[in-house]
Amino acid sequence: MIQTPLEEIISTVESMPPKSKWHFHMLTPDCVFNQEKEKHAFVLEANSKCLVFYSNEKQLETGQKLVRLLHGNKILEESNAEISQASEGNFLTDKAKECNEKKIIWHHHMLFPECSFNKDKGKWKIVLEVDGEKKVFEANYPAEPSSDLRVIELLLYKKNLQSLK
Ligand SMILES: [Zn+2]
Ligand SMILES: [Zn+2]
């Protein structure tokens, strides 16, 4: 991983040709993938390079900007109907819901098949890290798990909205 200013991460994304393969991670200090345990890490994987920016604060604004560039604007729109519909019988989304209900802190990662953090290369993976749990919860998928990811993003977004109240 190459340490770099945040501006360079943003400009790298903005200068990429359409349909380029890239993704990013926002790692909290306690995240299993974060090598710098005192800091937040903003990781960009693009053009087979891995860039990282460490900071004391979570880079939420940049995260939202990049989420929109990567998945489109729709991902962050609230829809309760979709939450109840798409998540039935799925242990990851159930776990996230349960944590929201119990007000337990959690976060997730969607690992692309070629992601440097993905132990099962070639598969899509969603990883859920729950505060106070020693193990992570993960599921592999043969294709992009769009609906599960969307449900989890919405649950996370909801949780964040609740904590602002
Ligand atoms: Zn994590
Ligand atoms: Zn990755």
Image (tube, grey):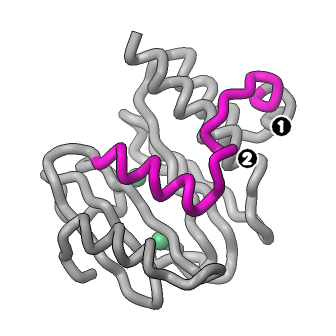
> How far separated are the C-alphas under marks 1 and 2?
7 Å
Q: Which residue lies furthest to the bottom in this view?
A: 48
Could you say which disc has been placed on residue 86 in the image? Answer: 1
Up-down relation of residue 101 to residue 111 (above or below): above
Report the residue marked by disc 2.
Answer: 148
Say left or right for 108 vs 76.
left
Q: Which residue is drawn at 37% across and 55% down?
A: 26
Query: Quarter holding the C terminus?
Result: top left
Q: What stretch is highlighted in magenta?
A: 59-83
Say left or right for 163 vs 83.
left
The secondary element bearing badge 2 is classed as helix
Q: Which amino acid does label 2 sit on?
A: Asp
Query: Quarter holding the N terminus?
Result: bottom left
Q: Ligand 1 closer than 8 Å to the CB at disc 2?
A: no
Asked if the residue under mark 2 is in contact with the one under mark 1, i.e. CB atoms within 8 Å, the reply is yes
Q: Which amino acid does label 1 sit on?
A: Ala
Q: Which residue is drawn at 35% across and 67% down?
A: 10
The image shows residue 159 at horizontal and vertical percentages of: 50, 24
Magenta stretch encompasses residue 35 = no
Crowding near the residue tagged with mark 2, few <14, some 14–19, many ≥20 C-alpha atoms within 10 Å: some
Say left or right for 113 vs 117.
right
Q: Residue at x 41, y 30 (%)?
A: 105
Q: Residue furthest top?
A: 165
Q: Examine the image and state in which quarter residue 151 appears.
A: top right
